[in-house]
Image: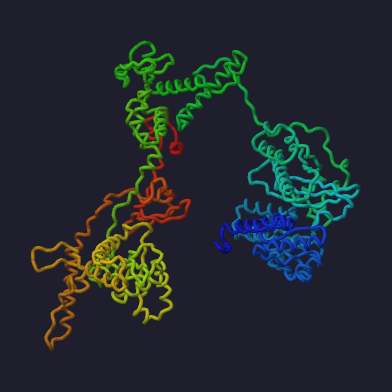
Amino acid sequence: MTVMTFGATCSLSCAQYVKNKNAAEYREEFPGASQCIIENHYVDDMLVSVDTEEEAIKLARDVRDVHAMGGFHIRNFLSNSSRVLIALNGSSTDALCLDFENEQPTEKVLGMWWVTSSEHFAFRVSSKYKNSDLLLSQRRPTKREVLSLVMTIYDPVGLIGFYVVYAKVILKEIWRAGCDWDDPIPDDQFAKWLRWIKLIPKIENPRIPRSYARIKFDDTPKIELHTFVDASASSYAAVCYLRYSHGNSIDCMMIASKTGVAPPKLLSIPRLELKAALLGARLAKHIIESHSIHLDSSVYWSVSRTVLAWLYADHRRYKQFVAFRVSEILELTDVSEWRWVPTAANVADESTKWNSDPDFSNDSRWFSGPSFLYLPCDEWPVSNGPQSISTEELRPQFIGAHCRISEQLLMVPKPERFSTWDRLLRATATTLYCARIWLSVVRDNQVLRSVATTDDFRKAENFLWRKAQQDVFNDSIISVSVGKAADKSSKIFKLSPYLDDNGVLRIDGRVKIIGRTDQVLLPSNHHITHLIINHLHVKYHHVNSETVVNEIRQHFWILKLRIAVNRIRRSCQVCKNRSTQPRPPRMACLPTARIAQFCRPFSYVGVDYFGPLLVTVKRSTEKRYGVLFTCLTTRAVHLEVAYSLSTDSCILAVRNFMARRGSPLEIWSDNGTNFKGAERELKSAFTLVDQNRLTITFTSAATNWHFIPPASPHMGGAWERLVRSVKDVLQQILTSNCPNDEILRAALMEVEMTVNSRPLTYIPIDHEEEEALTPNHFLLGSSNGVKPIAEPVTEGVLMRRNWRTSQNLADAFWRRWVTEYLPISTRRTKWFEDVKAIKVGDIAYIVDPNNPRNSWPKGKVIGARTSADGRVRSATLQTICGIYERPDAKIAVLDLKSSVHANRQDIPGGSVTNSLAARSG
């Protein structure tokens, strides 16, 4: 790009980057100006303070020169010094005064009103509300009006936050009362609203000095940051002050405040005080990072002894709500910086408790700070005694000891709660590991400090195998354990099962290999078996079921193994996603345009483009495009040449077609932008052209233009197939790859004649002189146009006879069309069965045959469009890339109702929900 683009998402970032890069290039020549541009610019606004007028003039000129070297022009300087304004603007008058209601020159600096003459910030009430009946007549407002008025008070740093927060509390109460946007607010909130709104004119009283220090110090003062926090049942707040001190000279000024409304969920006062402390720590950190002033120390004041106890104690002992917030406070501040302050001296109390009307005077403690900050440090409030340990919010701890722990009494996790074998195995091994630790404590009085070992995992496997076997083969296990064979009616009788040293049931096979144990016997319909099969199915990437069968045979003998493996594969969500295919509904009936008999040809038209076709123009080549118009009823074609893909070129092609074939009743096309543009142009042309000219040169008001859904070529097969026929004939006619425009147009006319001469039905064999029905029969009266429509009449015979003969011949062609062509079009070629309709809420892939399956976009169906027969033919999907409309032949709906836990009715004790099953897939 050679120019700056405005309005794009990246515009602000690009502007900042270019501004800073230009300043960095002149850092050595103009170090002060470069630093000012990088650190003291907000987009194209410059805000900076210096000590002397000479420094201000030099800095402003250097900044202007640096910007000018980059092609940027900074102007309209403002200052509290007339000398600086004269030096920079040539005049001390302020031509950009935006406040016309006041005599003093007032400017907006990043949304704040700045009175340059007296060097202070002020607030203004919008004239929209100053004289409105909302303030004058004190009528009951709606929730919308309450929010609108509150939002007009722009206070980015919270200078009057002690007043605005009360309106936010009222707005929260209105919201909780269930009041609608345009309903009057309830009585309780209206009474509070009247109290708040009568104070609006007073927000113009404060004059907040721009400079933090109101007095001049002989030497460098000590600067401290003091942050006060407080909370009540309705709100919490934090306010920060800078304290300057040198000897007996002390000055204090407010910097910023931050307020918040208590959350809808009821919280205790100590928790709200903790939220206020965290708010103060974050605000102080932001102030320290945003200022270039060096701070000697920071002090944080809170009235809550509970919060101070939490800060001084081990926060890991408390509940998560307290522990996380205390941890963040300790990261932002040091615990030694926190001090206690009584409620009467806490200035943050102004914004949390409205016992009386707020004080808007300039010398109020909200703007000037509490009185004790003007005293020496040894006279500040101190807490009585050390901080005690708070027992509130302590995390409960439970300790249990058992003298004897047996395997049967272990609280082993239930397998039905797990969706993967690895998690179940690890949880079981961890339980066995904990049991081993407790046994060591009880017996040996010594805690083992190792983690779960391989032996624990091996024991966990044996335990899970035994559990699956006991749930299904319990009777056989009892028989085998006493030395008997399994019952003959049992499914495992022929496998000769036996119990090994660990109590696991194994088969006594014929093959004995040294170093290899016999296979573990598992039932096919148990949840543990399903997890094992699914584990191997996922391990081998959902590809080959025989590989899974082979791996299972190495260690297990599962009854009906292949049936179980196939059940897992069919219920696997990944496999279902990979194999899903679109399922179009039964092919719809032919539309009215395809069976409209006894009507003028080209009454129902389908339009499509083909090409490009290269033509020779002088010594260069240009692109041309063919425009195919097909009669949807008689299958006749009409060809035009478009010189581009623009809307104007499309309109000219349509006008040429209408001039030769007449105005159609309906025009069908795909979703090409040129066709959509043509429709808009046609609609606008109806209002600009008079009726006579519209009838002669353009279409009538009854003409409709329809679009098929995007990416649905099968819905436009009536013209898509003819495009191929036209291309085949055109390839045979054109001898040159780049003909001129005249040859191309002549070739398209020859193609049109040839395609229109094709038979629509089988060639009759009962009469040798009778020819097959072609589109030219409806256009020219015969297949090639040579045979006249009617024989010439002798002199004296009325011409009316010729007209009647032509009409009778046309009717004969239509009767043949009905009896010969229409019956062969009634058969469906595919999509014979009814399928489950796509519905809103389905998750589906948008199939793109040109791309691999793993790149198909996935989305949620948000709308479905049905045809006249009640079947869904297209749907609208919401994806992460946008909203798309696609036909049902390009939508593959995903089955999300089952997963590894499919057919849970076959699993004893199974109760896992479908949502858990789908998650493992």
**Residue at the farthest front position:** 619
At which x and y percent is residue 628? 30, 67
The answer to which image quadrant residue 783 occupies is bottom left
Considering only vertical position in the picture, is 489 above or below 591? above
Q: Residue at x 73, y 58 (%)?
A: 30
Decide which of 266, 414 is in the foreground and name it.
414
Residue at 36%, 37% in the rendered image: 570
Residue 854 picture location, percent across and down: 41, 45
Residue that lies at the very extreme toward the top in this rendered image: 483
Of the pair 289 and 881, the residue shown nearer to us: 289
Does 508 appear above or below 568?
above
Which is nearer the eye, 149 or 5?
5
**In the image, farthest residue toward the right:** 248
How many discs mark residues in the rendered view?
A: 0
Looking at this view, name the residue that lies furthest to the bottom: 796
Measuring from the top left, give residue 522's x and y in whole percent.
Answer: 37, 23
Q: Quadrant of residue 81?
A: bottom right
Q: Is residue 299 visible?
A: yes
In this image, 388 relative to 899: left or right? right
* Residue 804 coordinates in the image, percent (x, y): 17, 79
Colouring chosen for the image of the structure: rainbow
Quarter that holds the N terminus: bottom right
Q: Is residue 617 left or right of residue 79?
A: left
* Quadrant that contains the C terminus: top left
| Residue 188 visible in the picture | no
